[in-house]
């Protein structure tokens, strides 16, 4: 239960990403700066936290063991996750991006066979290849229905090209984030806490953000003061607080792919938090009845998904954390 609550709080702070990215886009900011500045500003914040706990040296030792692995999966988990989300903000409102982002629940479930989980047998715990939780995945399809309803309403006011530019990057991000996160959990093997892991992945993804910044400087110039301030807020609320909360939640259920999928399902709450934020701070129009229906279906799917994946018939008391 505690891991689920941490997931919900993470969803609240993650919603600042969608609201502030949309705000920056509407004020003329470029998505390249929105993406790169978040992670650049995260580094000093995380360094202070990790160094205050005297955990920087242990982190660097673990990173030196497999620098190429850190670079690869940090690029996937942070780079291919956040840059596409920022790109999509140019084509869709924040609440709609947050709603479509919930497809990561399905993406996360489909990734299960690529990882191992610990199974308790008569001969003791052994590692077993993860299996797709089909009952939970069936409930996830309800979430997909809600996303489709929201996108149908959006498609009435934009071109097919813009719709694809708003949806395709989110689908890419929905696979990249859980893939990179889970791969780094395997690499860390419980040796690093959430703050260390986030800092390590941020440092390893820094080459990408520096390249993007250079490209942004050459094409659009320096970011505005307003975009810089909002990027700092995204770094604090979403990059540090939300990411650490989410990583803590996933660490608590590490080794159980079904429970891990449930934690990822809590991120469905981002859509309501994002909508509330845009209503308050951006004064957007209320979504239509169809969009509201889609949002409620997304939340219903999240509840059913959580119920099914926690049922005794799925767990059998055999899987251990």
Image (cartoon, rainbow, N blue to C red):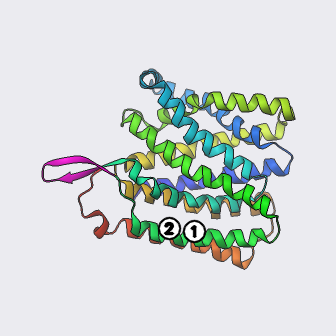
x then y, percent, for residue 160: 78, 64
Label 1 environment density (alpha carbons within 10 Å; few <14, some 14–19, many ≥20):
many
The magenta-colored residue range is 118-129
Query: Where does the N terminus fall, quadrant-wise?
Result: bottom left
Q: Characterize the local packing of mark 2: few (<14), some (14-19) or many (20 or more) Cα atoms within 10 angstroms.
A: many
**Labels in figure, total:** 2
Residue with the mark numbered 2: 140
SS for callout 1: helix
How far from the left and from the top, in percent, is residue 69? 47, 31
* Residue at the outermost left position: 122
Query: Compared to 57, does 186 lie above or below?
Result: below
Residue 86 is left or right of residue 218, and the answer is: left
- Work out whether 72 lies above or below 123: above
View extreme (front): residue? 161
Q: Is the C-beta separation of discs 1 and 2 under 8 Å?
A: yes
Q: Residue 144 carries which label?
A: 1
Residue 257 figure quarter? bottom left
Front-most of residues 142 and 250 = 142
């Amino acid at each position: 239960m505690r891991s689920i609550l941490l997931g919900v709080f993470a969803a609240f702070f993650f919603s600042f990403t969608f609201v502030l990215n949309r705000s920056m886009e509407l004020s003329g900011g470029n998505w390249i700066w929105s993406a790169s500045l978040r992670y650049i500003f995260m580094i000093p914040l995380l360094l202070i936290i990790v160094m205050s706990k005297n955990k920087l040296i242990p982190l660097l030792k673990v990173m030196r063991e497999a620098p190429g692995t850190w670079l690869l999966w940090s690029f996937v988990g942070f780079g291919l996750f956040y840059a596409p989300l920022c790109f999509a903000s140019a084509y869709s409102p924040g609440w709609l991006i947050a709603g479509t982002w919930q497809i990561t629940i399905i993406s996360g479930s489909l990734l299960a066979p690529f990882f191992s989980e610990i199974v308790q047998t008569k001969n003791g715990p052994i590692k077993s290849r993860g299996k797709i939780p089909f009952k939970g995945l069936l409930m996830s399809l309800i979430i997909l229905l809600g996303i489709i309803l929201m996108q149908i309403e959006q498609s009435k006011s934009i071109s097919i090209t813009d719709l694809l530019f708003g949806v395709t990057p989110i689908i890419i991000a929905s696979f990249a984030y859980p893939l990179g996160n889970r791969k780094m959990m395997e690499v860390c093997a419980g040796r690093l806490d959430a703050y260390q892991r986030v800092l390590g992945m941020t440092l390893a993804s820094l080459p990408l953000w520096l390249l993007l910044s250079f490209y942004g400087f050459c094409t659009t110039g320096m970011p505005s003061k307003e975009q810089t301030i909002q990027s700092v807020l995204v770094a604090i609320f979403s990059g540090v607080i939300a990411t650490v909360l989410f990583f803590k939640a996933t660490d608590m259920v590490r080794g159980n792919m079904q429970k891990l999928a449930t934690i990822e399902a809590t991120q469905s709450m981002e859509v309501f938090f994002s909508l509330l934020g845009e209503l308050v701070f951006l004064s957007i129009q209320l979504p239509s009845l169809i969009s509201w229906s889609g949002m409620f279906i997304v939340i219903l799917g999240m509840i059913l998904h959580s119920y099914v994946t926690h049922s005794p018939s799925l767990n059998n008391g055999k899987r251990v954390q």
